[in-house]
Image (cartoon, rainbow, N blue to C red):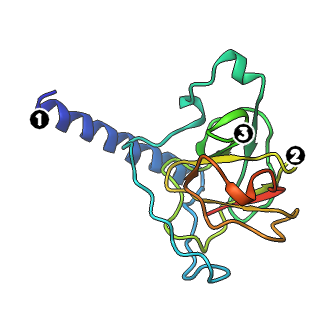
Amino acid sequence: MTITTRTRTRRARLAAVVGGLAAIAALGMTAPAATAAPDDGTAPVQVEAVTSETPVMVEDLKISKAAAATTWYCAVKDGTFGCQDAKPGTGLVVARLYQYKNFKGYQIVVFNPKYRVGCTAGTGDNEGGANLGHENAISSVKTYNHCDVRLYNGYNKTGAHTRFIDRDSDLGAFDNRANSYRIS
């Protein structure tokens, strides 16, 4: 790829992002506001290595027909708790929660239908969460688009919890203990 082609590609991506932001603003949607400090003061801010210039959307996921039968969806929204929709939709993927270690077994795809560019920096904000319908059955986690997830062993974000996780193929002592989660 030549420098000229690369520059055109970057300009096209930037134009798509700017156009998308204008469309979001026209619909009256706004980006989430960040909070100054973490809610409990115990978790340091996680730094995530960005491996893609393009946000990962639900429709970008490559889920086989066989895996689709064991994939659940949960739409979360800022400042709310609970799945707003439990069917595949359009939106930014924030996390995938897996039944088994090493990202195997059934999965729960958590997405935010209002996001187009990613979560806010830091872990003090509330970018949604929910109780898990699959109690005590999560063993690995992947997050996307600068988002983090915290797992709780109680319902409604109560009880013992993990640090904020970017990616973990083996939850160790928290394996099969999660009953709810929070996105930040």
Write down the residue under mark 1.
3
Amino acid found under the numbered disc labelled 1: Ile
Query: Does the image show residue 146?
Result: yes
Q: Callout 2: helix, strand or loop?
A: loop
Task: Indicate whether 65 appears above or below 102.
Answer: above
Residue in front for this viewpoint, 62 or 125 = 62
Q: Is residue 34 left or right of residue 149?
A: left
Write down the residue under mark 2.
133
Q: Callout 1: helix, strand or loop?
A: helix
Closer to the observer: label 2 or label 3? 3
Write down the residue under mark 3.
100
| Mark before the other along the chain sequence, 3 or 1 | 1
Task: Indicate whether 89 appears above or below 144.
Answer: above
- Please tell me how crowded label 3 is: few (under 14), some (14-19), or many (20+) other residues with Cα within 10 Å: many
The quarter of the picture where the C terminus appears is bottom right
Q: Are marks 2 and 3 in contact (CB under 8 Å)?
A: no
Q: Residue at x 53, y 30 (%)?
A: 60
Query: Does the image show residue 112?
Result: no
The location of residue 13, given as percent across then percent down, is 33, 39
- Please tell me how crowded label 1 is: few (under 14), some (14-19), or many (20+) other residues with Cα within 10 Å: few
The location of residue 159, given as percent across then percent down, is 83, 71
Task: Indicate whether 74 appears above or below 3.
Answer: below
Q: Residue at x 87, y 64 (%)?
A: 154
Tell me how far mark 2 sits from mark 1, CA to CA. 49 Å
